[in-house]
């Protein structure tokens, strides 16, 4: 919906001054950076099409849908004239504890669900802009629609695409991205140059060799995909490579030299909850479905469901030393109603040399 009055008011305000004001408001709302992009991504379409054609997206069928809207944001939100890109840092102040029986969870998921935090702040930013220029058409997105957010952020100069496919900046990659599609006539910012050079530390760090080359990820081997997006059994040849990672993986980011310059997040939303930064696998395996849902309310982890949670923990326990406590905890799950859970528990017990008959 186009608000002609708002557009006329916006034209009375110098575009660069308005952009600077939006950046200031964004900082006041907790964003670490704000940038602006034009709604044109057709140049990125060929790379996406090739990636999909090779089947590297695995079971993420949604990636193959709405490709036209991904390449042309104006078809996703009619009337879009500029896109405001927001960066929100999430790195915890302390690194998670890494004991042999510790559950490793991707840092982005230790605190509150970033979707809610990002959307709430984008909404407040939009309302602040409205107070200056009047009502205008906009829609906020936080990893919730067919939006090529890394490419938009790259074009807006928030960073460059690292060889691990994530957006990377001189202050690292520990951040979320969100977008405001607007009908405001704001000129785009300029892209920045990449600074990876000959470094391939991120590619070499992957436990499952999921990178088939620079800037090319085979999701079917990616631990984040296997523990979050993948609904079925985890391939047996990959299970020993998961270590004790039960939700996501940060290895490629941890290996990146630029992340030495990352600063801890300022927002309390992303502080670890429920002791997830120092939890033991056997304790998490004991959670009932009700406990899982209650304790992880407001967490991004909750969306994988209790079944995948148990599947992932069972595999992780297969990569730890065999102890009586672990074996007892696993055997307690042998009669779980889910075939998926029972299969992975059985695999782990066999791997630990502790089949049910022993």
Image (tube, rainbow, N blue to C red):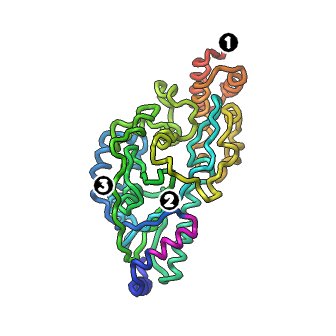
Is residue 271 within the magenta segment? Answer: no
- Asked whether, in this view, residue 267 is left or right of residue 82, the answer is right
| Disc 1 to disc 3, C-alpha distance | 56 Å
- Asked whether, in this view, residue 99 is left or right of residue 108, the answer is right
Residue 217 sits above or below residue 47 on the image = above
Residue drawn at 42 percent across, 84 percent down: 13
Q: Position of residue 203 (x, y in %)?
A: 40, 37
Badge 1 marks a residue whose secondary structure is: loop
Q: Nearer the viewer, residue 164 or 122?
A: 164
Quarter of image, res 341: top right
> Total marks drawn?
3
- In magenta, the rendered stretch is 20-30
Q: Nearer the viewer, mark 1 or mark 2?
A: 2
Quarter of image, res 342: top right
Q: Residues within 10 Å of mark 1 (few under 14, many from 20)?
A: few
Residue at mark 3 = 44
Residue at mark 1 = 358
Counting residues from the N terminus, which is met first, the one under dot 1 or under dot 2? 2
- Please indicate, yes or no, whether residue 125 appears anywhere in the rendered image: yes
Residue drawn at 40 percent across, 59 percent down: 153
Asked whether the beta carbons under mark 2 and mark 3 sit within 8 Å of each other, the answer is: no
Residue at mark 2 = 142
| Disc 1 to disc 2, C-alpha distance | 50 Å
- Asked whether, in this view, residue 127 is left or right of residue 39, the answer is right
Counting residues from the N terminus, which is met first, the one under dot 2 or under dot 3? 3
Q: Nearer the viewer, residue 219 or 17?
A: 17
């Amino acid at each position: 919906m186009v608000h002609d009055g708002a557009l006329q008011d916006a034209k009375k305000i110098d575009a660069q001054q308005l952009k600077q004001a939006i950046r200031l408001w964004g900082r006041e709302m907790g964003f670490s950076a704000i940038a602006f992009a034009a709604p044109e991504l057709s140049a990125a379409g060929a790379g996406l099409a090739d990636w999909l054609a090779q089947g590297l997206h695995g079971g993420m069928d949604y990636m193959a849908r709405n490709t036209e809207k991904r390449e042309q944001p104006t078809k996703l939100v009619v009337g879009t004239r500029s896109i405001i890109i927001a960066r929100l840092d999430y790195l915890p102040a302390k690194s998670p504890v890494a004991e042999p029986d510790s559950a490793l969870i991707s840092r982005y998921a230790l605190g509150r669900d970033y979707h809610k935090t990002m959307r709430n702040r984008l909404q407040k930013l939009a309302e602040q802009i409205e107070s200056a220029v009047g009502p205008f058409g906009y829609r906020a997105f936080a990893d919730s629609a067919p939006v090529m957010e890394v490419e938009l952020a790259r074009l807006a100069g928030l960073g460059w695409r690292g060889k691990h496919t994530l957006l990377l900046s001189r202050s690292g990659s520990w951040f979320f991205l969100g977008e405001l599609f607007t009908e405001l006539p704001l000129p785009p910012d300029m892209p920045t140059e990449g600074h990876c050079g000959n470094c391939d530390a991120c590619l070499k760090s992957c436990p499952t060799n999921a990178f088939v080359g620079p800037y090319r990820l085979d999701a079917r081997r990616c631990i984040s995909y296997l523990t979050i997006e993948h609904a079925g059994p985890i391939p047996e040849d990959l299970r020993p490579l998961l270590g004790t990672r039960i939700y996501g993986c940060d290895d490629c980011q941890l290996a990146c030299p630029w992340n030495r310059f990352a600063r801890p997040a300022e927002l309390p939303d992303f502080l670890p909850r429920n002791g997830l930064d120092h939890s033991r696998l056997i304790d998490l395996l004991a959670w009932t479905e009700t406990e899982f849902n209650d304790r992880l309310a407001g967490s991004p982890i909750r969306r994988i469901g209790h079944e995948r949670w148990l599947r992932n923990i069972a595999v992780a326990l297969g990569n730890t030393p065999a102890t009586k406590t672990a074996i007892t905890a696993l055997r307690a799950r042998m009669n779980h109603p889910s075939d998926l859970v029972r299969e992975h528990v059985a695999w782990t017990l066999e791997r630990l040399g502790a089949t049910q008959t022993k």
